[in-house]
């Protein structure tokens, strides 16, 4: 009985190691309805985002011009975190993308290092 109990505990402890790591790849939508397609690019550790559709106040002619275009490319800086640039309203901004949970991604864009905005995206 003790051996069975020990194996049960061991199985529970090793299960997370066997679980597949979360990946940012996929389709993501923010609370306004703007949709991004994320993929690993470059050497497989970089993160790229293509704008699929844009909604809300961001649905301007300037931003609609980027639909189906790559708008973000970022280098991995830590596990589940990438830093690079994002195009928004026709200009580039420094960006940080963080996979905070398997189905939650936050992207922060900053202009002039002080004008920052963070958007939360949910995997769809």
Image (cartoon, rainbow, N blue to C red):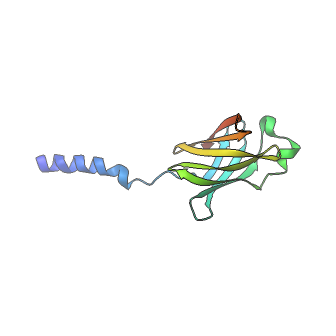
Residue 53: where, in percent of width, then height? 76, 47
User: Residue at (27%, 51%) from the top-left corner?
Assistant: 11
Counting from the top left corner in percent of width and height, residue 34 is at 73, 42
Based on the displayed image, in which of its 4 quarters is residue 20 positioned?
A: bottom left
> Which of the two residues, 113 or 84, is positioned nearer the viewer here?
113
> Could you tell me which residue is drawn at 74 percent across and 50 percent down?
51
Figure disc tally: 0
Q: Residue sitting at 57 percent across and 63 percent down? A: 44
User: For residue 123, which quarter of the picture?
Assistant: top right
Pick out the residue farthest to the bottom: 43
- Give the residue drawn at x 82%, y 40%: 59
Task: Relative to 71, say whether 115 is above or below.
Answer: above
Say above or below: 23 vs 110: below
Q: Nearer the viewer, residue 105 or 27?
A: 105
Q: Position of residue 14 (x, y in %)?
A: 30, 51
Q: Quick one: which residue is furthest to the left in this view?
A: 1
Residue 12 at what x, y percent from top left? 29, 47
* Residue 31 in sight from this viewpoint: no
Instruction: Classify residue 100 as left or right of residue 38.
Output: left
Q: Is residue 100 shown left or right of residue 66?
A: left
Q: Is residue 46 visible?
A: yes
Question: Which of the pair 92/107 is nearer the observer?
Answer: 92
């Amino acid at each position: 009985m003790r051996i069975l109990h020990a194996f049960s505990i061991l199985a529970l402890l090793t299960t997370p190691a066997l679980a597949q790591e979360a990946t940012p790849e996929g389709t993501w939508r923010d609370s306004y309805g703007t949709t991004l397609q994320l993929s690993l690019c470059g050497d497989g550790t970089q993160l790229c985002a293509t704008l699929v559709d844009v909604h809300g106040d961001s649905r301007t002619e300037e931003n609609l011009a980027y639909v189906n275009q790559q708008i973000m490319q970022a280098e991995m800086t830590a596990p589940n975190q990438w830093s690079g640039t994002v195009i928004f309203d026709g200009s580039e901004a420094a960006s940080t993308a963080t996979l905070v949970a398997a189905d939650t991604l936050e992207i922060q864009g900053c202009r002039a290092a002080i004008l920052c905005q963070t958007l939360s995206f949910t995997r769809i």
